Image (cartoon, rainbow, N blue to C red):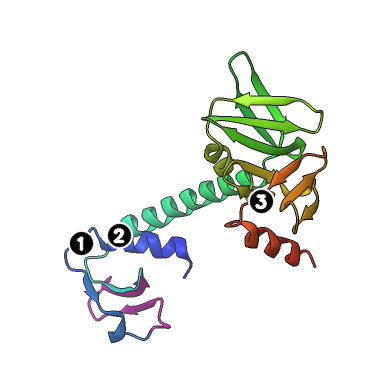
Amino acid sequence: MNRTTQIALAHWANLYSQNEFLPSRLENKNTTSVIRKANVPEEIVITLKYNDKIIKMLPPVDPNILSGLVQDALENNETGSRAAVRAKTASKIVINTLDRVHVINIADIIYCESDKGYTTFYLTNKEKVIASKILSKYEAVLPSTQFMRIHQSFLVNLEHILCYEKKDKNCVITTNNHEIPVSHRLKSKLIDYFEGLG
């Protein structure tokens, strides 16, 4: 049984006071779904593991409610999945400044710098765009597989790192030849990334 169906069934279970919530130890931990027809027509007992609890759904079972909830959950899951895919594959970001709305290719962002509540975007065309939002707001939007926070004030595009000066300066050199400091707290994360590249 997939996660979506589990959520729908668990939601359905909450509609009825006859539900029994049993400790996981009373049931086989590998059991996710057992459906059994009882002697009484249309009587179904469903047992499933959800959020580390075993939920037994007892009659009355309304097939219309159950199928509707499953369908709703499937549609919600599909919508959420599409949004997640869009977030992962987004190629542009919109940045509002005092006088313009900038639509910027994410690949063109070399790094972002925070300064007193503002964020400056350094771009491949040598342009700088200053936005009146804090860096963490953009960190949450930009893809984490492509951008890394290497310092409290800097979020760098990993594709634009040329090298890492790990001894004397403890900084990365970007494709626009800027030196970006690496904090001691975040240094290991950056090193893990480089080691992962092989």
Q: Are marks 2 and 1 in contact (CB under 8 Å)?
A: yes
96 versus 106 height, above or below: above
In reply to whether residue 47 is colored magenta, the answer given is: yes
- For the image, the number of numbered tags is 3
- Residue in view at x 33 percent, y 56 percent: 64
Q: Residues within 10 Å of mark 1 (few under 14, many from 20)?
A: some
> What residue range appears in magenta?
29-50
138 versus 101 height, above or below: below
| Quarter of image, res 95 | top right
Q: Position of residue 111 (x, y in %)?
A: 70, 39
180 versus 35 height, above or below: above
Q: Secondary structure at mark 2?
A: helix
Q: Nearer the viewer, residue 129 or 26?
A: 129
114 versus 57 height, above or below: above
Q: Which residue is mark 2?
A: 12
| Quarter of image, res 101 | top right
Q: CA distance from mark 3 to mark 2?
A: 51 Å
Q: Which residue is mark 3?
A: 182
Q: Which residue is mark 1?
A: 16
The numbered mark, 1 or 3, whose residue comes first in the sequence reads: 1
